Amino acid sequence: MTVTVRLPTVLRPHANGQSQVVAQAGTVAEAVTWLVGEYPGIAPNLLAEDGSLHRFVNVYVNDEDVRYLSQMETVLTDGDEVSILPAVAGG
């Protein structure tokens, strides 16, 4: 499946300044694996030491939070948009 991965500002320098990239992936996990393989500098900002997503990274597929879908195994279809967003805290 061809999907668009939208990157937050903090990850763009590691992806040649791009705000979005096109990936071939069937699941969110595959999209993240592709992203880290293509742009290794993204990994420290995206993944924990065990390879899972950092707890402060949120991932959405077409504006749906993957935590309420099938998490990293959420299935993607052609044309889906995967958005990676850092969690924001404050008051």
Image: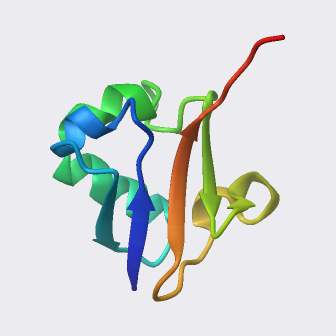
How many tags in the picture? 0
Residue 12 on image: x %, y %: 29, 39
Residue farthest toward the top in the current orientation of the protein: 91
User: Is residue 56 left or right of 79 when viewed as pictured?
Assistant: right
Q: Give the vertical position of 58 relative to 79 (above or below).
A: above
Q: Give the vertical position of 59 relative to 62 (above or below).
A: above
Residue 78 on image: x %, y %: 46, 88
Residue drawn at (29%, 59%), measured in percent from left and top?
34
Residue drawn at (59%, 77%), measured in percent from left and top?
75
| Residue situated in front as seen by the camera: 89 or 23 | 89
Quadrant containing the C terminus in the rendered view:
top right
Residue drawn at (52%, 78%), measured in percent from left and top?
80
Q: Give the vertical position of 82 relative to 88 (above or below).
A: below
Q: Give the vertical position of 19 relative to 14 (above or below).
A: below
Residue 9 on image: x %, y %: 40, 35
Residue 67 on image: x %, y %: 75, 52
Q: Name the quadrant containing residue 55.
A: top right
Color theme of the render:
rainbow
Q: Name the quadrant containing residue 74.
A: bottom right
Residue drawn at (40%, 86%), measured in percent from left and top?
1
